[in-house]
Image (spheres, rainbow, N blue to C red):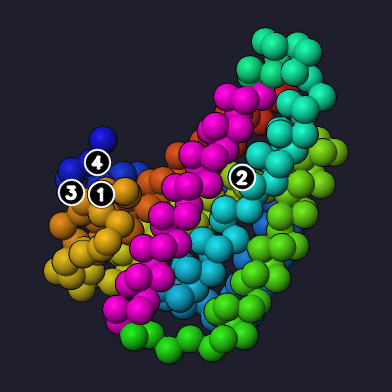
């Protein structure tokens, strides 16, 4: 259910008043890469690159899980747990996909100029590498892959909420999109980005819960 304007503002304040995670080395390198190639300033185009990358851990986990189901269908109860995990990963992946499509739509509406190498080619290369890192970490120890994703999602959560704080004009810009029925209806761009930031927090918390489950199962 879509949250109200006041609820979204409360969620934004919760994020802004919370410290960021202590990011691991891989996450720090990724964020440094983003700042070097796309600048430290938060822009719609930079967020679009983040969303291209954000989907791939869920794709990697889904891939590994399907392989596991192929080898464990003889144990129906375990296979069912794996299948439920696949559905959850697919849902998170789809959510990130809506973020990307909506951002692309806004960027095109605003006619932002984007360099083909930086905003089309390079993000695909980074996503390809990030997929394999996430996949390898998951195969070695799932908690490592979940922790990397939690770092990424925590970063995205704070970046979106700070983006809204630093752009008060978003409070007056109407949100119109072909994807409203799929993602949600919001009066302004400010509430749209607050909701995306909240999505990232939920993804972070789901990854942290998976770490706990992996540790105590």
Mark 1 or mark 2: name the one nearer the start of the chain.
2
Residue nearest the observer in this picture, 39 or 129: 129
In the image, 39: left or right of 32? Answer: left
Residue 164 showing in the rendered view? yes
Q: CA distance from mark 4 to mark 3?
A: 10 Å
The residue that mark 2 highlights is 58
**Residue 101 sits inside the magenta stretch:** yes
Give the extent of the magenta segment: 82-110
Question: What is the tally of numbered marks visible in this picture?
Answer: 4
Picture residue at 16% right of the left edge, 66% below the top: 174
Residue nearest the observer in this picture, 190 or 57: 57
Outermost residue on the right side: it is 140
Kindly report which numbered mark, 1 or 3, lies closer to the viewer in this rendering.
Answer: 1
Kindly report which numbered mark, 1 or 4, lies closer to the viewer in this rendering.
Answer: 1
Q: Quadrant of the N terminus?
A: top left
Q: Are marks 1 and 4 in contact (CB under 8 Å)?
A: no
Give the number of the disc on residue 5: 3
Residue 110, horizontal then vertical, whole percent: 30, 81
Give the number of the disc on residue 97: none
Q: Secondary structure at mark 1?
A: helix
Q: Quadrant of the C terminus?
A: top right
Give the number of the disc on residue 2: 4
Kindly report which numbered mark, 1 or 2, lies closer to the viewer in this rendering.
Answer: 1
Give the number of the disc on residue 181: 1
In the image, 156: left or right of 152? Answer: left
Q: Main secondary structure of the magenta part?
A: helix
Kindly report which numbered mark, 4 or 3, lies closer to the viewer in this rendering.
Answer: 4
* Relative to 73, residue 28 above or below: below
């Amino acid at each position: 259910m879509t949250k109200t304007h006041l609820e979204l503002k409360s969620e934004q304040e919760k994020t802004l008043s919370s410290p960021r995670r202590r990011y691991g080395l891989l996450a720090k390198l990724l964020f440094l890469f983003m700042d070097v190639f796309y600048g430290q300033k938060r822009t719609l185009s930079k967020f679009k690159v983040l969303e291209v990358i954000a989907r791939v851990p869920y794709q990697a986990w889904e891939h590994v899980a399907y392989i596991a189901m192929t080898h464990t269908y003889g144990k129906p109860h375990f296979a069912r747990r794996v299948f439920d995990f696949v559905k959850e990963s697919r849902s998170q992946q789809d959510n990130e996909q809506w973020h990307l499509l909506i951002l692309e739509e806004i960027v095109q509406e605003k006619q932002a100029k984007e360099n083909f190498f930086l905003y089309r080619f390079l993000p695909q290369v980074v996503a390809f590498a990030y997929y394999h890192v996430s996949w390898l970490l998951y195969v070695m120890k799932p908690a490592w892959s979940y922790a990397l994703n939690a770092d990424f999602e925590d970063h995205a959560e704070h970046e979106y909420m700070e983006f809204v704080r630093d752009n008060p004009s978003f409070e007056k810009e109407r949100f119109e999109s072909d994807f409203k029925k799929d993602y949600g209806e919001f009066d302004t761009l400010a509430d749209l980005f607050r909701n995306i930031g909240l999505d990232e927090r939920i993804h972070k918390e789901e990854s942290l819960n998976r770490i706990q489950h992996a540790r105590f199962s």
